[in-house]
Image: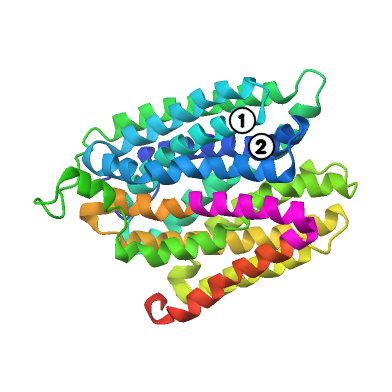
Amino acid sequence: MSSTKPESIWNVAFALLCVTQFLGYAQHHLLQPTFALYVTHLGGSPFAVGLVIASFSVTSVLFRPFIGYCADCWSKTGVLILGLLIQAISMLFCFIPSVGAMMLTNGFRGLGWAGMNTGGYTLLATNAPAARRGEAAGYYGGVQASATILFPAVALWIIAAPFGGFHAVFIVAMALTLLGAAAGVALSHQTPHDPPSPPADSSESWWCSIINVFDRSIVLAAALLFCLNLPTSGLSSFAVLYAGEIGISNFGWYFVVTGATSLIARPLLGRLSDNIGCGRSLVVAFTLETVSLFLFSMVTNLAGFMFSGILYYVGSAIGGTTIFTLAMEKAPPERRGRAMASFSLAFSLSSGAGGLLSGLAVDIAGYAWMFMITAALCALGLVLTGRYWLQLK
């Protein structure tokens, strides 16, 4: 991703990186409502849905140190491409009609997801202009979020179509990740020189380098990201089930509106942390998410869902770009792959923990209480922001 004008954000390599992320995230958002509906179609409970979501995180967490090591010592683009291919192959297990097969599918998807995100974030952190990191993170996150505009709704439409069904969604998801891998190959030609990062300590053995994935410099950013994204998996997967329970029709439009919000908000608000500071941006982000989740527990119609979703995804856009900028600033150059693996690990941990907690809350107390519980957990991000305010100014 080299450029003769380092102050420039947009070039061929950055555009191809964005294409790979769009296609990978399109597959992910196509499957989020689909998995929840398919598991319940197979007879699974909301808690079983939570287990399927959590299985996505298990492999991602376990293998993330090794993936970060490979990004540093092998190839960033190679890790990206391999992650997309693994996600495509994992879809084959979806054609086995059992909840266990769905857990296996999501487990393999989590491994591929870790590779796609670690490779992508490392490439961006390595090449984003230092003075415009917030803006670059905003565009990058906007491309990822743009997949939420239509693909969850498309999944619902394909499932309901006479020619469609769950298997048709799985085929489309596989095709999207294969196209993403092809874009990754094209990206590799734009980055012919992808040298491994020099080791921080040449005396450190290779297996210690893999295990020692956590950099203290990145832990705060990862913890903030965990709090910010903790409600997201439950919201994405269980909102459609909740809407069905209370009789809301045409729910696909909710995904269109919230996806458009993410697409518009991330590039426009990407410079916010550059202008007002990291700490203030995070206060706004966590406040918006917390308020929106409380509103979700009270809404009874599609308009209420849309309004609450807009608030949530504006907060997510502000927080996501701010925290990503913080991570890029803190990542040590000689361990950037492992540092960004450490950072992106928070996505998987929050997805698994959020999905499992949300499913358990629904089984025990119902959907409304699930939203209130996740709102309280999200508010912990405000506590963390206040505690480390001086480091975020």
Q: In which quarter of the image is the N terminus?
A: top left
Residue 341 lies left or right of residue 356; in this view the side is left
Label 1 vs 2, first from the N-terminus: 1
Circle 2 packing at 10 Å, graded few (<14), some (14-19), many (20+), is: many
Nearest the camera: 69 or 49?
Answer: 49
Residue occupying image coordinates x 62% and y 50%: 356
Residue 5 in sight: no
Q: Position of residue 285 (x, y in %)?
A: 58, 68
Give the magenta-colored segment's residue range: 348-370
Q: Main secondary structure of the magenta part?
A: helix
Residue placed furthest toward the top? 163
Q: Quadrant of residue 161?
A: top right
- The disc placed on residue 100 is 1
Which image quarter is the C terminus in? bottom left
Q: What element carries label 1?
A: helix
Nearer the observer, 118 or 257: 118
Q: Residues within 10 Å of mark 1 (few under 14, many from 20)?
A: some
Q: Mark 2 points at which residue?
A: 151
Q: Does the magenta stretch include residue 72?
A: no
Residue plotted at (67% across, 35% down):
35
Q: As shown in the figure, which amino acid type bears the numbered disc 1?
A: Gly
